[in-house]
Amino acid sequence: MTETGAMRPTRQRTAVVEALETCGEFRSAQDLHDLLGRRGETVGLATVYRTLQRLVEAGEVDLLRTEDGEAIYRRCSTTHHHHLVCRGCGRTVEVEGPAVERWTRGVAAEHGFVEVSHTLEIFGTCAACAGRVG
Amino acid sequence: MTETGAMRPTRQRTAVVEALETCGEFRSAQDLHDLLGRRGETVGLATVYRTLQRLVEAGEVDLLRTEDGEAIYRRCSTTHHHHLVCRGCGRTVEVEGPAVERWTRGVAAEHGFVEVSHTLEIFGTCAACAGRVG
DNA sequence: GAGAGGTTGAGAACCATTGTCAACTCTGTG
DNA sequence: CACAGAGTTGACAATGGTTCTCAACCTCTC
């Protein structure tokens, strides 16, 4: 366990963060690993997973799951927000919904729940992808 | 493909549905398989998975994912709804939020997205569990 | 530049889930 | 009832994402 340990700056970590930075969309760990390989930056798959895990814990990266349970990651703003994600190309829009936040808190309180958290993601097909197919 | 094919009533399917019915909480396929085994109802694991899949497609069972991506299933009402789930005991409350539905559709439309779907789950600690600990 | 301890990577291990396929069960028909 | 045809089952293999293992390797400090 390295609860509070500093995260040493290594070539590999820099590479992973950079990869996340450049491709602004949600990507799986394996995608990022491939992407790094094609770029010439060899980083072990295990290291990619470990680094992403750390970043998620640190709140610097958002983690969500596709419909079949695969984990996908994205560099995001650190304020609380949700995502509108295109199923086709992965294009992502960060959205905020104060009303929704209020609603969830209200519902939870109404039923006597405390320590409330929630997940809310919107999936759809963006205009570009919808036009491309039929 | 059995798109519209009728679902034949078999001992195994009845058993799975009954198992879901009796334990009202979200359970993984493996849990249900074990549960059936202990009950004396032998049903193959593959069959449990297949049956659950069918039920989800038919909208008779709700599927959601734990934080580590495992699929869990629950017999639910067939109208569109979301869940307020207790982290401690798994107690589940079905909730509806017309305003949220409207909001998600609006946000999606605003960004030119079509074929929109969304996931929204609320996690918290219910009054009983909160009282029990600290 | 030596020591201590975090970090890496190749491959094995894990584990939920899905595929395979021969045997089996239903249901409708003659 | 026998029969055919189609859906269903289950033991087991195969997949595939993710984590573990552990010896070799960096980084930092003194």
Image: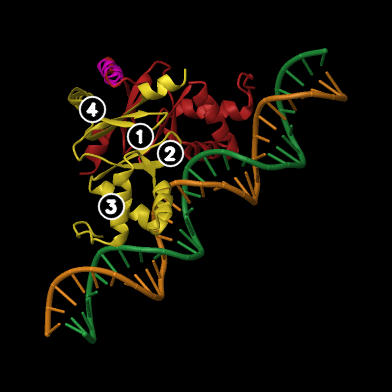
Chain colours: A red, B yellow, C orange, D green
Residue under label 4: B108
Same chain shared by disc 4 and disc 1: no
Q: CA distance from mark 3 to mark 4?
A: 29 Å
Q: Secondary structure at mark 4?
A: helix
Same chain shared by disc 2 and disc 3: yes
Q: Secondary structure at mark 3?
A: helix
Q: Are marks 3 and 4 in contact (CB under 8 Å)?
A: no
The location of residue A132, given as percent across then percent down, is: 24, 41
Res A67 → quadrant: top left
Q: Residue at x 19, y 59 (%)?
A: B6
Q: Amino acid at mark 4?
A: Ala
Magenta span includes B108? no
Residue under label 2: B69
Chain identity of mark 1: A
**What span is colored magenta in the figure?**
A99-109
Q: Which mark is residue A90?
A: 1
